Amino acid sequence: MVHVWRIRATGCEPAQYLYETLSDQERRSAQRLRRDERRRQFIQTRVCLRRVLAGYLAMAPNDVPITYGPLGQPLLDATEPGESTCQVRFNISHSHELALIACTAGRLIGIDVEHLHQERPFDRLARRYFSTSEYQSMFTGAPGDASAVRARQFLRGWTAKEAVLKARGLGVAGGLASAQVSCPVNAPTRLVQLDNDAVNRWTIRELSSDDDYVTTLAVRGAIQTLQMFDLDAACVFG
Ligand SMILES: CC(C)(COP(=O)(O)OP(=O)(O)OC[C@H]1O[C@@H](n2cnc3c(N)ncnc32)[C@H](O)[C@@H]1OP(=O)(O)O)[C@@H](O)C(=O)NCCC(=O)NCCS
C-alpha cells in the first residue's frame, strides 16, 4: 500500500500553535529559508507530515520522532521504541505551489514533483545530466520545435531519476549516473540500470495528478495499491 498526500500551499502565515508542533530543528530549518513562500510551504508541509505520520503511528504530531539520514533525508527514528515507528517510510517533494508526501511500510520510497511551467534550457540540461541513451529515449519522436513536449520529457526523466535517488536517501549527491532511466514519448518511464541493485526490484510510477506538474514515484517492490489524498490546506491552516 502506498499513500500519496497532496498539499497545495496557501498564502497564509501558519498560526503560532502550528509552528509549535514542529521540532526545534524544523523551526531552525524554517528560519533559514529566506523566501517567505518557501518558508511557509516548508512549515505547512511539515505540519501536514507530522499529522499524517501521527495518524499511522497513533501518537501526537509533535511526538513523531523525525531524524535525518547522512545526506539529509528525513526518516522516522528507528531507535525509538515501537515496531510500527521504524516500519513507516516516507518522502517529501515540493515544487511551486504543490507539496507531496509519499508513505509506505517497510520499503524504500522516493517522490519527486516538478512544476511544468519553468523557463529552463531543457535541451542543454538534458545533454549535461543524462547519458546519451537516456537523452535518446527522452527526445526521439519529440518534435524539435515543441518546447512544451521537450520540457515534459525532460521533467519525466528528471523526476524518475531523482525519485529513485531520494528513495535511496542519496538525492543527487548519489550521482545522477547511478540510476539510468528510459522515458519514451507516449510510453511509461522505466528504470534500466541501478548501481548495486536489480532494476526489477523497483517500481516507477508516473502520477498524473495535475496537468501543471510532472511527478514520479519510486518504490522498492511492487505497488499493489496506490491511494492519493488531498490535504485541505485551508482547513489545516485556516
Ligand atoms: C534533497 C534533494 C534531493 C532536494 O531536491 P529538490 O528537487 O530540490 O527538492 P524536493 O522538493 O524534491 O525534495 C526536497 C525534500 O527531500 C527530502 N530530502 C532531503 N534530503 C534528502 C535525501 N538525501 N534523500 C531523500 N530525500 C531527501 C526532504 O524532505 C526535502 O524537503 P524538506 O526539506 O522540505 O523536508 C537535493 O538537494 C539533494 O540531492 N541533496 C543531496 C544531499 C546533498 O547534497 N545535500 C547537500 C546539503 S548537505
Image: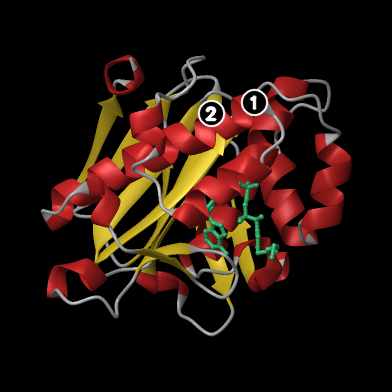
Mark number displayed over residue 36:
1
Q: Is residue 186 above or below residue 134?
A: above
| Residue 233 lies in quadrant | top left
Q: Position of residue 211 (x, y in %)?
A: 50, 19
Q: Is residue 141 above or below residue 69?
A: above
Q: Position of residue 73 (x, y in %)?
A: 51, 63
- Going by the image, does 2 lie left or right of 12? left
Of the residues shown, which amino acid type is indicated by label 1? Asp
Q: Position of residue 90 (x, y in %)?
A: 35, 56
- Going by the image, does 162 lie left or right of 208? right
Describe the element under mark 1 as helix, strand or loop.
helix
Marks 1/2 in contact by CB < 8 Å: the verdict is yes
- Whether residue 100 is visible to the viewer of this picture, yes or no, is no
Q: Residue at x 43, y 32 (%)?
A: 44
- Going by the image, does 148 lie left or right of 186? right
Q: Which residue is mark 2?
A: 40
Q: Residue at x 62, y 41 (%)?
A: 31
**Residue count near mark 2 (Cα–Cα under 10 Å), binned few <14, some 14–19, many ≥20:** some
